[in-house]
């Protein structure tokens, strides 16, 4: 699994685990597929911000690699 700090690791349609703003303290992760990449810079120390197909927004913690 690669982390979500580099924008070029993240592709539209990819399965990822994100942490939403309200879950940052608890660390609860939300699983989903990337609809839109919201962070413009190529790197972010807390993870690239994305929108999932469900409309949820958060920072990528894990990229789920397909086999």
Image (tube, rainbow, N blue to C red):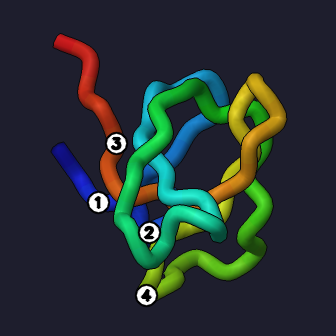
Tell me the CA gap for discs 4 and 1: 10 Å
Report the mark closest to the observer, 2 or 1.
1
Report the mark closest to the observer, 4 or 2.
4
Would you name the residue on which mark 2 appears?
6
User: In this rendering, would 5 be left or right of 50?
Assistant: left
Residue 58 rendering spot, x and y as whole percentages: 63, 58
Disc 3 secondary structure class:
strand
Would you name the residue on which mark 1 appears?
3
Would you name the residue on which mark 3 appears?
63
Tell me the CA gap for discs 1 and 3: 6 Å
Tell me the CA gap for discs 2 and 1: 8 Å
- In the picture, the disc for residue 40 is none
Label 4 crowd bin: few (<14), some (14–19), many (20+), radius 10 Å: few
Q: Earlier in the sequence, mark 2 or mark 3?
A: 2
Mark 2–mark 1 CB contact (< 8 Å): yes
Mark 4–mark 2 CB contact (< 8 Å): no
Tell me the CA gap for discs 4 and 2: 9 Å
Q: Is residue 22 above or below residue 15?
A: below
Residue 24 rendering spot, x and y as whole percentages: 49, 73
Mark 1–mark 3 CB contact (< 8 Å): yes
Residue 44 rendering spot, x and y as whole percentages: 52, 83
Q: Earlier in the sequence, mark 4 or mark 3?
A: 4
Q: Is residue 37 visible?
A: yes
Label 1 crowd bin: few (<14), some (14–19), many (20+), radius 10 Å: some
Residue drawn 49% across the image and 50% down it: 18
Q: Residue furthest bottom?
A: 45
Would you name the residue on which mark 4 appears?
45
Q: Is residue 7 visible?
A: no
Q: Earlier in the sequence, mark 4 or mark 2?
A: 2
Tell me the CA gap for discs 4 and 3: 15 Å
Q: Quadrant of the N terminus?
A: top left
């Amino acid at each position: 699994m690669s982390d979500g700090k580099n924008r070029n690791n993240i592709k539209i349609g990819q399965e990822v685990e994100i942490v939403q703003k309200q879950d940052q303290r608890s660390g609860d992760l939300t699983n989903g597929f990337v609809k839109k990449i919201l962070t413009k810079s190529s790197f972010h120390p807390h993870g690239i911000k994305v929108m999932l197909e469900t409309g949820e927004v958060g920072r990528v913690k894990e990229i789920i690699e397909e086999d």
